[in-house]
Amino acid sequence: MPKKKPFSAGRVPLILFLCQIVSALDVPLDHGGKAKLLDDLVQPPTITQQSPKDYIIDPRENIVIQCEAKGKPPPSFSWTRNGTHFDIDKDPLVTMKPGSGTLVINIMSDGKAETYEGIYQCTARNERGAAISNNIVVRPSRSPLWTKERLEPITLRNGQSLVLPCRPPVGLPPAIIFWMDNSFQRLPQSERVSQGLNGDLYFSNVLPEDTREDYICYARFNHTQTIQQKQPISLKVISVDELNDTIAANLSDTEFYGAKPSKERPPTFLTPEGNESLKEELRGNVLSLECIAEGLPTPIIYWIKEDGTLPVNRTFYRNFKKTLQITQVSEADSGNYQCIAKNTLGAVHHTISVTVKAAPYWIVAPQNLVLSPGENGTLICRANGNPKPRIGWLTNGVPIEIAPDDPSRKIDGDTIIFSNVQERSSAVYQCNASNEYGYLLANAFVNVLAEPPRILTSANTLYQVIANRPALLDCAFFGSPRPTIEWFKGTRGSALHEDIYVLHDNGTLEIPVAQKDSTGTYTCVARNKLGMAKNEVHLEIKDPTRIIKQPEYAVVQRGSKVSFECKVKHDHTLIPTIMWLKDNGELPNDERFSIDKDHLVVTDVSDDDGGTYTCAANTTLDRVSASAVLRVVAPPPTPAPIYDVPNPPFDLELTNQLDKSVQLTWTPGDDNNSPITKFIIEYEDAMREAGIWHHQAEVSGTQTTAQLKLSPYVNYSFRVMAENSIGRSVPSEASEQYLTKAAEPDQNPTAVEGLGTEPDNLVITWKPLNGFESNGPGLQYKVSWRQKDGDDEWTSVVVANVSKYIVSGTPTFVPYLIKVQSLNDVGFAPEPAAVMGHSGEDLPMVAPGNVRVNVVNSTLAEVHWDPVPLKSVRGHLQGYRIYYWKAQGSSKRNRRHIEKKILTFQGSKTHGMLPGLQPYSHYTLNVRVVNGKGEGPASTDRGFHTPEGVPSAPSSLKIVNPTLDSLTLEWDPPSHPNGILTEYTLKYQPINSTHELGPLVDLKIPANKTRWTLKNLNFSTRYKFYFYAQTSVGSGSQITEEAITTVDEGKLAGILPPDVGAGKAMASRQVDIATQGWFIGLMCAVALLILILLIVCFIRRNKGGKYPVKEKEDAHADPEIQPMKEDDGTFGEYRSFESDAEDHKPLKKGSRTPSDRTVKKEDSDGSLADYGEGVNGQFNEDGSFIGQYSGRREKEQAEGNESSEAPSPVNAMNSFV
């Protein structure tokens, strides 16, 4: 029997990799050491290595142009240069490496690199075909010097923008640009100063610290390792003060003509220019977009993509966000990108339209074909690009259109279809996909062979695998046609199927989870129509290596000893190697470290010994490890006491478990240097309120047990918290649960009420017990009721755990006795006390009778009625309600229906007052009884009249047509006459230049007049008028006005300022007094008087005092005008003494005096309780009457029903202010 060769798991991936190459390419020559098994097979050439398409060379070194290929027989090589044959034998500087197509051009000895610039292409050829390389463009690198130029110094004002141009020489490849100073230190860059993609240095705004003489642009050519330098640029930034000094000292030598500071300005773009620009990039490259702006303050740059978002993982910002880069750009990245420059003064944006083009790229590259004679096959060459690439085919390097014809092939666009191939069909095909941005060239051969199967895997290979891991058994093969592969286990086993095993295309058999019973011999069989081949391999399953005792975390003091243990268990056929590591490296070479069997011992531990120690056990098949951390600490000093809240108690235990009590015991935690003062015990009812903890009890800090009272039928858990002077600990772990036995309820529901909602029902409600109070399962309620005044037995019903029960069919508004008793599955609660309720109410049946009205005065009436029988109320008596309304006035005006007013009188009252009536009017009313259900029927309507009252003030009073000795008064009657007007009373008196009041004139005017002219008045004199109307009851409120007789026609003399209400006065005849001496003197006196009065007013206004003429006016008050009240002692004119005094104060700035009238207690014949509750918003919520008799201004009194008196005359000086 052949000797078995062990094959470790570490070598399996290599074999699988090689097998996959064979399977993918169907090329049998790629098997390295196994190639000897296929020495007799032929293979067309394949290019394996070549120089890049764009090949930039260093002109200081020899030129090496690579071209490597493989094939059987080995291929020969030839070259073209610029499209024509390159005869290397004729050039002594050009040689070709032996066994290779690589060219070596020896320009170091003699020659120039520029001589060999051109386009090179390599061809590898054998009897089966020819493969060609890419077109290799060879160019020498260039690093030219800067053109000599004279750079003028730059002088700028602080805050201006600047661009320092670099403009490096064009090199190959392009240079890398950077700015430095003379000391070769890079110039600092920021959001304000930065280098653009073109190499220029941009300043958004310059500062004085930018001043320097060595701004130098450097160009580094990496290919030749050279750096070229531009001439230094000098920049001076001067402030406004320096600029002014410069202008003053050397005006003719400066270009500046204005020494103004640079103002802050919104951003503008330094690059790119305009509002829009275009950018084109190739697929797969890095898209770089740049926006650099100037402005003051320095602008900030933002980027967005219109109608899209920037790719998350491929977007990068460079150069302080002035450059946006997108890597691996694709067609999807095309679109409009917007950069926005923004500072505090504004923003500007620029749109860059990006178009992504694409050089050709593979969709499906052609693959080598190995066919047997008579088989069919296809070569597919599928590429994409923008624009769409053109596909061209060559065979053996010759365009297929001019190549020799082959009847077995047919070209269909990007596909060549082969049918019934023969050995002469073998060739190498080239696919060329090209557009304006580049090309792709791929070689793929068709190799026609007739070969029986061959197994390339070594016979009797031994595979060793750890249990419960995948096992991969190799069966590398070759044959043409392609063989089929089958696997067998043992000598007589059937073929293995994919229900347990995995059969790979490259012949490998995979056992996903190898077990001990997977051990054995496996046979691989390869078949095609030309024959069969087989090979046996062997599989052994080993126990895994395990660390059964791992090293443990250790904290040791400096200078002590530490030991780590690592005990390993392994397969007895495998020999493990134990290795100790520190921080994933070897142990220190120190005698303090010793390994004794399963232990690592470290003596005299130092701080450097701290770290991670790993025990690694290796076998030929597996590796396991375990780690532990060593922490080295200093010997502890005597620690300072740490004061904190206590640690939570622990070891909670329940003992003496009775029906309604239990003993809880616990162990206190550390008090953390502050004695425990008390323990707080909480409980949880896991049955009803899991997770909610309630307070149970508190005990002193010296106790560790507590006797707890319990309620029936509760699933208790307890926890304990400790408290000291610092605070309270976190809760302990919960105790075990304890379910107490059920018991009958201890209590009955509360808030029991009986109230009907309909005339024939009784709704009984109560507040239910909570779950904790139920004391057991099956909580219910026994509801009992009977009529209070009857001899009926109790009626009872048991209901579920609800809060309401409705008794139907009851008499209307009958008192009931009610009881609600708790019960559960164990029994009843104690007998409850009875409460009284009533069945439902119905509307009252009877209207109040004998309604009587007593008119107290013109605005007040008293109503009396007889109560209704209580039985007819049919509910709780809430009171009586009066509806009253005004039907018509006594003045025989047209009838008008006015909205009804409502007053409610609480309880069993049988009389009430109706306030706020309109004098001289006819009213109608009725009375109704009210219960909880609503109103009963109305009583018979009763009508009554209110007597006359005093009128309101005349609606207006105007003085018109003033002359030298007359004034005409016009007025409108009172808006509320409150009776029949009998006459008007006009009183007036003059006011002299010293503000003294003259004699009072009293004048009676018929009631039918609305205009009156006063004659024989003094010229140029101010008069004050008091005007009011009268009825048979008395005088109404007065209205006042002032006016002045004229001095001369053509001049306005009687006009009061608009704010004092004076009328206009026009001269009645023309007298030329402008030239009279007395008139001039009078005008001077008036002007002086006005000036003095203005000063006095200003002083008095600031002090808030009275005018000095107040006392004089009080002395001249009209004695005939007194407050008028009705004689019946009820509401009429209600005024307090204080308001009477106020009416005699002078009017300020021509305004009328407000009257503050209040109701006097002695003027009312009843308390405010006699007034009902208003429904129309005229009365307070509590039924009190307000508002009708509160004070109003005189103009408002014109609308009211009250009498008033004439106020004292207005201070005459107010009309001049």
Image (cartoon, rainbow, N blue to C red):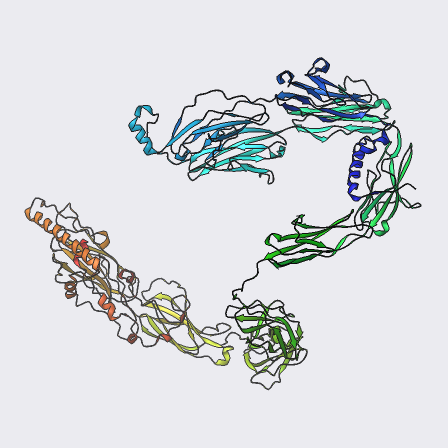
Quadrant assignment for the C terminus:
bottom left
Please tell me whether residue 1087 is drawn above or below residue 239 in the rendered image: below
Counting from the top left corner in percent of width and height, residue 26 is at 81, 32
Total numbered badges shown on the rendered structure: 0
Of 38 and 741, nearer the camera is: 38
Q: Which residue ends up furthest to the right in the rendered image?
A: 492
Q: Which residue ends up furthest to the front in the rendered image?
A: 591
Of 659 and 584, nearer the camera is: 584
Counting from the top left corner in percent of width and height, residue 531 is at 92, 33
Res. 267 visible in picture: no
Toward which corner of the image does residue 140 lie, by quadrant? top right
Quadrant assignment for the N terminus:
top right
Left or right, 510 with respect to 602, comes to right
Res. 595 visible in picture: yes
Left or right, 81 with respect to 638, comes to right
Of 460 and 847, nearer the camera is: 460
Please tell me whether residue 1025 is drawn above or below residue 869 in the rendered image: above
Left or right, 451 with respect to 847, comes to right
Counting from the top left corner in percent of width and height, residue 426 is at 83, 24
Please tell me whether residue 888 is drawn above or below residue 455 in the rendered image: below
Of 751 and 253, nearer the camera is: 253
